[in-house]
Amino acid sequence: VDSAASGLAEALFDLASVLNQPETIDLALVYDRFALQLRPDYPLGQLLLADILSAEDRPAASLRILEAIPKNSPYSWSAQLRAAADLDALGRTDEAIAKLKAMAAAEPKWAGASIQLGDILREKKDFADAAAAYRDAIARLQAAGMPERWSLYYSFGIALDRSNHWKQAETALEHAIALKPEQ
């Protein structure tokens, strides 16, 4: 923290983060806006504001905030994922899909873009392509030595089932149950 204003911005952001719950989202918005007034180039504050605006069903406003986060920021990846969700919410699904595919190609070790791509494609009932995106995400997580996620195998199984690959779907769903039996 290099100034009193910057320190106050941090404190207001922290408060906004804690208040970022459905029942107190309006207060979170106020405190985050104050933080950004004091420190306009605060990427974490911008991300939080974009999340709040998205939660309030204001994806266009969220997208404008995200565009201000520099590409060289350590928060750029998160901003791009949120932007893809906003594009989809605005009915610009083709742009969202293209963005996520480009992100996945640019960062072959990261699975987030592939997971989100699978989710969008599954929602649009493009189950075969959703299954391919989930398969890619699983492979990326395995290559990185990351823990398996039951919910990813569940989504993968659903996409396989809906694309008439029942035996593979059964295997994926059984694996999801093995990872989290209470689900």
Image (tube, rainbow, N blue to C red):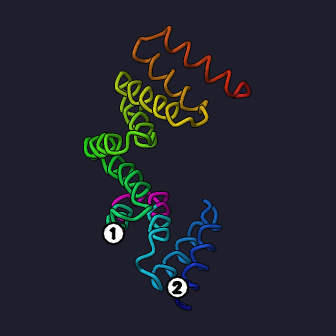
Q: Which of 159 and 1 is in front in this view?
A: 1
Q: Which residue is drawn at 45% across and 84% down?
A: 37
Q: Check disc 1 and report the residue beneath it.
A: 68
- Specify the quadrant of the image occupied by residue 20: bottom right
Q: Which residue is drawn at 41% across and 11% down?
A: 164
Question: How many numbered discs, if any?
Answer: 2
Q: Which of 16 and 68 is in front in this view?
A: 68
Q: Which of 66 and 113 is in front in this view?
A: 113
- For marks 1 and 2, the one nearer the N-term is 2
Asked if residue 42 lies left or right of residue 99, the reply is right
Tell me if residue 54 is in the magenta stretch.
yes
Q: Check disc 2 and report the residue beneath it.
A: 6
Q: Where is residue 30 in the image (x, y as percent from the top left)?
A: 53, 77
Quarter of the figure that contains the N terminus: bottom right
Q: Is mark 1 on a helix, strand or loop?
A: loop
Q: Name the amino acid, label 2.
A: Ser
Asked if residue 78 lies left or right of residue 64, the reply is right
The stretch in magenta equals 51-61
Q: Reply above or below: 181 against 60.
A: above
Q: Which residue lies furthest to the right in this view?
A: 182
Q: Residue at x 48, y 77 (%)?
A: 33
Q: Position of residue 63 (x, y in %)?
A: 34, 61
